Image (cartoon, helix red, strand yellow):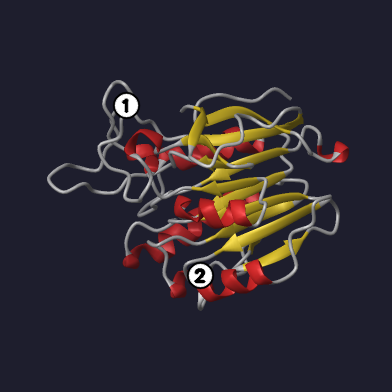
Amino acid sequence: MPLAYGLVHPVDLTLQDLPQELQGLRIAHLSDLHINRPRPRHDRLISQLSSLRLDMVFYTGDYMMRRRDGAQAGQVLARIAKAIRPRLGHFGVFGNHDSPQFAKQVADIGIHWLGTAVHDLPDAPIQLLGIDPLGKDADDSTAMLLNGDPLQSDKLRLMLTHYPSWLSTAADLNVDILFAGHTHGGQIRLPNGQALNNACDLPRNLSSGILRHRNTLIAISRGLGEVGVPGINKLRIFCPPHVPVYTLRQGSTLGCHTQGLVRVVRW
């Protein structure tokens, strides 16, 4: 079935060493929902994604708006996980707006929460690495991973984290693609796409899209929700919400090898 449009943003990603059996792998990427109540946007999201053939759904954090919103956020997240049936499953990490109590609340809704660890999928040549801000000693755990066994070169190596600042670590680990959120794409942008703020150490003109550092790609979602900006109501300007749906294909890896940071797909 062809991809729907609306919230869904189809993206083709080519990788030089993509295993043949993963040709056409399709991944939906949900991030930064910032839920404080059910919204029509969530119904559209479920309708659009449940009509697609998906292999995996990735969640990269900030499901709650505020600490008191755990019940509403959990209900919406459980609806999404129940309605969408990816072939290989749902996988996620938490963000800075999420609480340990919320993590316990959604532990059994059908999403495999990765924590800070490496997971080998039993039914596909894929390794998933999570970096979770709610985990204990995430920095120490990552250092142990760097000093331990390397990720396997004959598998697709995918990393999920809320913060795009983990890109250098992902490149050190030879991750193929890092999936992140947090920036909201700026949320409020100028007509030329320049973000006014992205709440991280990325250059503001590189607040979303597909970027490349060395041989690692990072996919930074604009996210689905909003947070309040001081003096301004919760809104988006020139930066609509979206759900990237990536289709992986064999071919030259997007962009070129660089020790810097370059954008290869703009959104």
Residue 103 badge: 2
Instruction: Look at 45% across and 60% down and name the residue there.
Output: 95
Give the farthest residue toward the bottom. Answer: 136
In this view of the protein, can residue 124 be seen by the observer?
yes
Determine crowd level at label 1: few under 14, some 14-19, many 20+ residues with C-alpha closer than 10 A: some
Assign a secondary structure to mark 2: helix
Q: In terms of image quadrants, where is residue 223?
A: top left
Task: Please indicate whether residue 84 sits to the left or right of residue 60 in the image.
Answer: right
Q: Identify whether 53 is placed above or below 110.
A: above
Task: Please indicate whether residue 80 sits to the left or right of residue 14 in the image.
Answer: left
Instruction: Look at 61% across and 49% down and name the residue there.
Output: 58
Earlier along the polypeptide chain: callout 1 or callout 2?
Answer: 2
Residue 215 badge: none
In this view of the protein, can residue 135 be seen by the observer?
no
Determine crowd level at label 2: few under 14, some 14-19, many 20+ residues with C-alpha closer than 10 A: some
Residue kind at label 2, given as amino acid type: Ala
In which quadrant is the N terminus drawn? top right
Q: From the image, tell me which residue sits under label 1.
A: 238
Q: Are marks 1 and 2 in contact (CB under 8 Å)?
A: no
Q: Position of residue 257 (x, y in %)?
A: 61, 36
Q: Identify whether 202 is placed above or below 250.
A: below
* 183 vs 141, nearest the viewer: 141
Residue kind at label 1, given as amino acid type: Phe
Q: In terms of image quadrants, where is residue 111?
A: bottom right
Q: Position of residue 173 (x, y in %)?
A: 65, 57
Q: In terms of image quadrants, where is residue 247?
A: top right
Give the farthest residue toward the front. Answer: 259
Assign a secondary structure to mark 1: loop
* 46 vs 262, nearest the viewer: 262
